[in-house]
Structures are given as C-alpha cells and as structure tokens.
Amino acid sequence: MSQSYDRGLIEDFGRWREFSAGMWAWIFHKFTGWVLVGYLFTHVAVLSTALTSASADPATVAANQDLYTQTIRTLESLLVVRVLEVGLLAVAVFHILNGTRLLLVDLGIGLESQDRSFYASLILTGAIVVASVPTFLAGVSL
Ligand code: HEM
C-alpha cells in the first residue's frame, strides 16, 4: 500500500533553518563547483583580451612593457583583486577537500562520520585560507 508524505515546498527558502550538515555540504559543493567554472571562463576571457602581438615581442616583454605584463601588474595592484583571490582559494580548497570526502564516501569509507568529516573540511578550509592571507595581501597598496 502506498503512503504519501508532505515534503513541503522546495521553493520555501525559509526551510534553510531545517538543513542538516549533509544539506549544507550539498549546497556548498554545488556553489563552489559552479563558482570555479565561472572563474575559469572569466579568467580566460579577461587575460585573452591582454594578448596582443606586442605580447609576443621578446624585446617588449624583456622591458616589461607588453600589455599582458601591464594588465597582470595592474590587476595585482588592486586590493579587491587580492581579496577575490583569497575567496577563490577558499572556494577551491573547500571543493577539493569536500570532493575528496565525497569520493571516499562513494567508496564506502567514512559512512558513519559524514557530518564530522564535513565539519573537518570546513575547519581545514578556514585554517588554510586564514594562513594564506598574509601571502595574498603582501605588497598591495591600500
Ligand atoms: C581535486 C579537485 C576536485 C575534486 C576532488 C572534485 C570533486 C567533485 C565531486 C566528487 C563532485 C560530485 C559531487 C556529487 O556527488 O554530487 C564534483 C562536482 C562538481 N565539480 Fe568538482 N572536484 C574537483 C575540482 C573541480 C574543478 C576544478 C571544478 C571547476 C572547474 C569543479 C566543478 C564541479 C562542478 C560544476 C560540479 C557539479 C556540481 C553540481 O552538482 O551541480 N570541480 N566535484
């Protein structure tokens, strides 16, 4: 005999309060995966606009006068770009750690400690990102 269940509306965004660790892991993994895809397209689009024939001229490159070098230097001199780089690291590290965790779970490893391994991924991501901040912000003028 079949039974019906009231699962509520998926459109009801107020349900985030009921989310368990597994739901947050699912949302963060999707979010970080698609942010990485978006970043890759933006990265290629921005940097390819800086590729000109002068970028291939050895003398111009040696003098650091080519558009590509100038573009990279300008981008790296901006605080907002450095902050975005820290964000990118956070997104990439979480996706890699959580993705590795998911692959292990798919292999049947750590099935009973999924919540704890998700929290461990979050804490490790936070620690790596905080430790990277001095490197990312080095030499930037405010
Ligand atoms: C060592 C690196 C990586 C690992 C271990 C990893 C792992 C995974 C795993 C296991 C899934 C499937 C999750 C599931 O079961 O639903 C996944 C999904 C995904 N990954 Fe990665 N990944 C890595 C790098 C990347 C990179 C570099 C990108 C983007 C350029 C990326 C983009 C995505 C996207 C878009 C999804 C699908 C998200 C969705 O469900 O909509 N991943 N990743």
Image: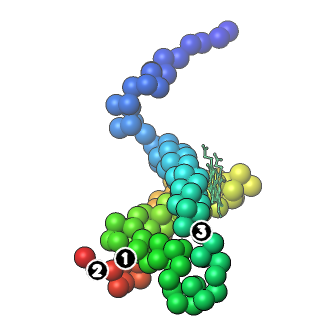
Report the mark closest to the observer, 3 or 1: 3
The correct choice, above or below, for 126 with respect to 12 in the image is below
Mark 3 and mark 1: Cα distance apart in space: 19 Å
Query: What residue sits 43% from the left and 39% below the top?
Result: 19
Say the numbered circle drawn on residue 141: 2
Residue linked to disc 1: 77
Name the amino acid type tagged 3: Leu
Circles 1, 2 touching at the beta carbon (< 8 Å): yes
Q: How many marks?
A: 3
Q: Local crowd at mark 3 within 10 Å, few (<14), some, or many (≥20)?
A: some
Report the mark closest to the observer, 3 or 2: 3
Q: Nearer the viewer, residue 66 or 4?
A: 66
The correct choice, above or below, for 116 with respect to 18 in the image is below
Circles 3, 1 touching at the beta carbon (< 8 Å): no
Q: As drawn, is 10 to the left or to the right of 103?
A: left
Q: Which callout, 3 or 1, points at the residue further toward the start of the chain?
A: 3
Say the numbered circle drawn on residue 51: 3
